[in-house]
Image: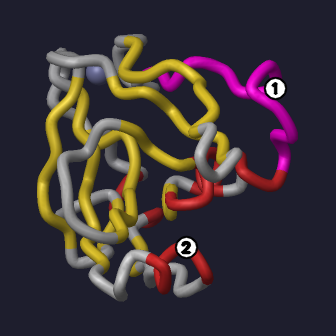
Amino acid sequence: MSDREPANRRQYRPRKDKYAKTRRGSIRLYTIMCAACRQPVLLYQKDGPGALLRLYLDRILAPPALADMHERCASKSDVPNLVCAHCGNVIAVPMVYAKEKRLAFRLIKGRWFKQRSTGLFPPA
Ligand SMILES: [Zn+2]
């Protein structure tokens, strides 16, 4: 981990909106980690139960460059692959979740793992 990261460490709060509410209020935060270099990639808010298969752009809370992607990207072609900033490992590819017409990343099996988070990113 580089020396500058502790200065960027921040506490993030979940987004409570229509998507969180339709999933019955169950919210968990996860740090998505790179399986290749074991560095944190992003902070994610998972609404509701079930396995983590995709990352909705509007649920990415940190880092800022990824967290504001849902405001910058209007369609799937605007969304780049999700790549580990430390080692270049491709963790996920863009997709649209048809049921909600929601932009997301489809996670690639074996490229990532998750850790429960309290909202601190990067994790201590
Ligand atoms: Zn990596």
Say which amino acid is labelled 2. Tyr
- The quarter of the image holding the N terminus is top left
- The quarter of the image holding the C terminus is bottom left
Q: Check if residue 77 falls in the magenta segment.
A: yes
* Residue at (51% x, 60% y) in the render: 59
Q: Check if residue 38 falls in the magenta segment.
A: no
Residue 1 shows in the view: no
Badge 1 or badge 2: first in the primary sequence? 2
Q: How is the image coloured?
A: secondary structure
Q: Which mark is residue 78?
A: 1
Residue 92, relative to residue 97: is it above or below?
above
* Residue at (35% x, 85% y) in the render: 24
- The magenta span reads 72-83
Q: Quick check: which quadrant has ligand 1? A: top left
Q: Which mark is residue 19?
A: 2
Along the line of sight, which residue is nearer the eye, 3 or 23?
23
Query: For numbered disc 1, what is the local secondary structure?
Result: helix
Q: Position of residue 84 (x, y in %)?
A: 40, 24
Within 10 angstroms of label 2, few (less than 14), some, or many (20 or more) residues? some
Give the alpha-carbon distance from disc 1 to disc 2, as whole Å: 22 Å
Q: Quadrant of residue 53?
A: top left
Horizontal placement of 81 versus 5: left or right? right
Q: Which mark is residue 69?
A: none
